[in-house]
Image: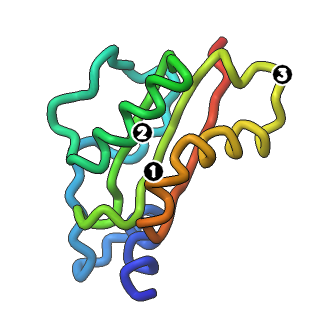
Amino acid sequence: MLQLRLAVRQWAGSNNPSATVRSRTPLSSLWNPASRSYSAPPSDLSEGERDIYQKLTEKFSPTTLRVQDVSGGCGSFYAIMIASDQFKGLSRVKQHQLVTQTLEKEIASIHGLQIKTVVPE
């Protein structure tokens, strides 16, 4: 539970010195739908991030996809931002259900997941 609280504090922008979070990308850019998208997983992803990235890419053909381990590198809490045409006309709840169904196996082994879905303009 403490680990989850530390991850949430870091996620919220707290400067808690006891929370060591490995960060390659500022979290603010993670949620920017205009940020750069990749056709292949970025080379600096961890194994868990890469697995999630590949599954979501295969299922949704996203225009933008960001996957980040925000748990300090232990793989217990991920933040995902995904923009896909497949979300058009669906409620936010249904969009999130599609993502969580796709990641059912991964979700079974982690403590937390934050999802942001976007319909491309």
**Label located before the other in sequence (2 or 3):** 2
Residue type pointed to by label 2: Leu
Residue type pointed to by label 1: Ala
| Label 1, residues with CA under 10 Å away: few <14, some 14-19, many ≥20 | many
Q: Quadrant of the C terminus?
A: top right
Q: CA distance from mark 1 to mark 3?
A: 23 Å
Q: Position of residue 113 (x, y in %)?
A: 51, 58
Indicate how the structure is coloured in the image.
Answer: rainbow
Residue annotated with mark 2: 30
- Looking at the image, which residue is at 28% across and 41% down? 25
| Label 3, residues with CA under 10 Å away: few <14, some 14-19, many ≥20 | few
Q: Position of residue 57 (x, y in %)?
A: 44, 25
Residue annotated with mark 3: 89
Question: Are the residues at dot 1 and dot 2 in contact (C-beta closer than 8 Å)?
Answer: yes
- Looking at the image, which residue is at 55% across and 52% down? 104
Frontmost residue, 108 versus 7: 108
Frontmost residue, 71 versus 86: 86
**Splitting the image into 4 quarters, where does residue 42 fall?**
top left
Q: CA distance from mark 1 to mark 2?
A: 8 Å
- Looking at the image, which residue is at 48% across and 32% down? 56
SS category of the residue bearing label 1? strand
Residue annotated with mark 1: 79
